[in-house]
């Protein structure tokens, strides 16, 4: 996840069909490791996505989140993007995040405990 600033007029309009193509699921972080090979400070996560299995993701949230705070946390992940190689690590899902007022990435989490693997609709 990266901190990015977007201007609304620069983004093309998406259709409902575009949104329906995204498979966004609730996952539970089960392991967190440092990722010193990444260009920007990051963690390597293992995320339980229920029926989809355990997936890996790289996230740039080290400025806001300690590793021990992340274990057990539920996050939202895009599960149907192609895997992305970062250094010697393959990120299999995109863990969603939004910038805070300082530009640090905040993970997107369900407001309440949700079913692991549950799909956003």
Image (spheres, rainbow, N blue to C red):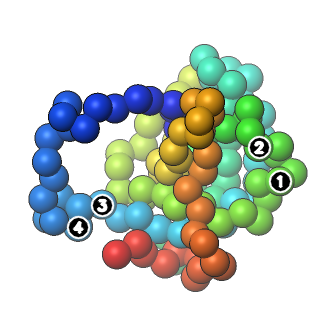
Q: Nearer the viewer, mark 1 or mark 3?
A: 1
For mark 1, what is the residue?
69
111 relative to 82, above or below: below
For mark 2, give the secondary structure.
loop
For mark 3, what is the residue?
22
Residue 120 is drawn in which quadrant? bottom left
For mark 1, give the secondary structure.
helix
Question: Residue 112 in the image: x percent, y percent?
Answer: 63, 78
Labelled disc at residue 65:
2
Res. 74 in view: yes
Q: Nearer the viewer, mark 3 or mark 2?
A: 2
Cα–Cα gap, marks 4 and 3: 5 Å
Is disc 4 in contact with disc 3, using a CB cutoff of under 8 Å?
Answer: yes
- Badge 4 or badge 2: first in the primary sequence: 4
Q: Residues within 10 Å of mark 2 (few under 14, many from 20)?
A: some
Cα–Cα gap, marks 1 and 4: 32 Å
- Badge 1 or badge 3: first in the primary sequence: 3
Q: Nearer the viewer, residue 1 or 64?
A: 64
Is disc 4 in contact with disc 2, using a CB cutoff of under 8 Å?
Answer: no
Q: Residues within 10 Å of mark 1 (few under 14, many from 20)?
A: few
Q: Is residue 82 left or right of residue 110?
A: left
62 relative to 45, above or below: above
- Badge 3 or badge 2: first in the primary sequence: 3
Q: Nearer the viewer, residue 72 or 5?
A: 5
For mark 4, what is the residue?
20
């Amino acid at each position: 996840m990266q901190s990015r600033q977007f201007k609304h007029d620069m983004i093309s309009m998406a259709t409902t069909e575009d949104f329906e193509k995204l498979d966004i699921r609730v996952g539970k972080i089960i392991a967190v490791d440092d990722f010193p090979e990444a260009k920007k400070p990051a963690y390597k996560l293992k995320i339980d996505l229920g029926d989809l299995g355990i997936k890996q993701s790289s996230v740039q949230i080290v400025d806001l989140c300690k590793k021990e705070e992340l274990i057990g946390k539920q996050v939202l992940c895009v599960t149907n993007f192609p895997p992305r190689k970062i250094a010697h690590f393959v990120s299999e899902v995109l863990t969603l995040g939004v910038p805070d007022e300082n530009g640090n990435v905040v993970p997107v989490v369900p407001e309440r405990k949700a079913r692991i693997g549950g799909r956003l609709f």
